[in-house]
């Protein structure tokens, strides 16, 4: 490529990104959130992850006048912004000024442990709300629309690293991604993952969405996929990022059908591993794969017949774990290798077919 062409690419890239920097008080930021001017939960953002200790440490940093990294916003419309980077800081600031949590485990101001914002002396409340200024960098509307996703990914390479599903949520945004997050709201899946609120770890790290994608990927290619399951999930998202509506309807039906029959057959023991005289109260990815994919291979009338013999299936599942070492290993160790995925699905399929 000629130097002049390289220079043109550089200039075009510069023109695509239009930034504005400003310094805002904590009170201004909290008010913008309360008014709905700042969207704290755009679809590409990670879910809430900070515990009250980290939130408290941030507030203490403001009290100590310690510099805090800037926040990055994207101007979606005039007077409307979404967060690119700094979601946890904005949520923490807003929550504290709205008296939603008490300060906890402070290192320099232990005397303030247990205080809500309203409990602070008036001078301190005013100083905290008005004096500290936080640098806010805004991508203005005229920036290229895809740039906010690129900025989000680049900024989040540091600090608390994004996990694989959080990256997919940004990189493969679209109708498939939206559907996955709707399916992740399934009550039974949430119950098996022990998601009781937005504070639950499986919700905050997007495990619920990843399990939906895991099933969709394996049901599509469990017999012939090779290499990394994580990479296969990425490829599935990439290939079907903008699918036909009929495809979305089919996979929605398939997931809902399989999760329904998993509950109907194994009930509270679905996706769990028997241990001794009981069951380990934890969703096992390998068992989830085996049961969900095996169900996807059967017709509705076959599954209806199996639900009448569900105790036979539960007993056979226990026997397979206890007496088939290869199956037990396939659901517990190196679970993402192609050979073990195929083996555990085949064994579970045999168990179900024996009950038809």
Image (cartoon, helix red, strand yellow):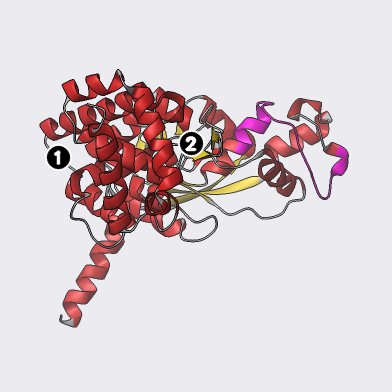
Q: CA distance from mark 2 to mark 1?
A: 26 Å
Question: Secondary structure under badge 1?
Answer: loop
Q: Identify the main secondary structure in magenta.
A: loop
Question: Which quarter of the picture shows residue 82?
Answer: top left
- The residue carrying mark 1 is 243
Task: Tell which of 222 and 54 is nearer to you.
Answer: 222
Q: Quadrant of the C terminus?
A: top left
Residue 151, image x, y percentages: 39, 55
N-term-proximal mark, 2 vs 1 = 2
> Is there any visible trace of residue 42 in the rendered image?
no
Q: Which residues are magenta?
A: 92-111
**Is 22 contained in the magenta span?**
no
> Is there any visible trace of residue 202 in the rendered image?
yes
- The residue carrying mark 2 is 203
In-image side of 19 versus 15 (left or right):
right
Residue 226, image x, y percentages: 23, 60
């Amino acid at each position: 490529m000629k130097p002049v062409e390289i220079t043109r690419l550089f200039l075009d890239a510069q023109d695509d990104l239009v930034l504005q920097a400003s310094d805002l008080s904590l009170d201004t930021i909290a008010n913008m959130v309360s008014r709905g001017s700042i969207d704290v939960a755009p679809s590409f953002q990670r879910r809430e992850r900070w515990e009250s200790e980290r939130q408290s440490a941030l507030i203490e940093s403001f009290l100590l006048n310690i510099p805090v990294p800037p926040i990055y916003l994207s101007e979606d419309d005039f007077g409307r912004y979404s967060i690119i980077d700094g979601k946890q800081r904005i949520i923490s600031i807003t929550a504290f000024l709205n008296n939603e949590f008490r300060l906890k485990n402070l290192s320099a101001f232990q005397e303030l442990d247990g205080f809500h914002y309203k409990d602070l002396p008036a001078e301190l409340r005013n100083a905290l709300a008005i004096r500290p200024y936080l640098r806010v960098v805004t991508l203005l509307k005229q920036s290229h629309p895809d740039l906010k996703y690129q900025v989000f990914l680049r900024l989040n390479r540091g600090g608390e690293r994004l996990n694989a599903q959080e990256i997919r949520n940004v990189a493969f945004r679209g109708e498939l991604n939206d559907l996955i997050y709707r399916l992740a709201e399934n009550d039974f899946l949430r119950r098996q993952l022990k998601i009781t609120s937005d504070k639950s770890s499986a919700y905050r790290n997007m495990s619920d969405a990843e399990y939906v994608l895991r099933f969709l990927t394996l049901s599509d290619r469990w017999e012939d996929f090779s290499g990394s399951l994580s990479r296969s999930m990425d490829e599935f998202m990439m290939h079907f990022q903008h699918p036909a509506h009929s495809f979305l309807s089919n996979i929605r039906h398939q997931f809902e059908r399989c999760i329904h029959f998993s509950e109907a057959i194994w009930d509270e023991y679905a996706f769990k591993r028997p241990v001794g005289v009981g069951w380990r109260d934890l969703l096992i990815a390998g068992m989830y794969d085996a049961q969900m994919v095996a169900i996807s291979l059967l017709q509705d009338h076959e599954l209806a017949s199996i639900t009448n013999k569900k105790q036979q299936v539960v007993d056979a599942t226990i026997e397979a774990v206890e007496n088939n070492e290869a199956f037990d290993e396939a659901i517990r160790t190196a679970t993402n290798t192609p050979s073990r995925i195929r083996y555990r699905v085949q064994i579970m399929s045999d168990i179900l077919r024996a009950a038809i």
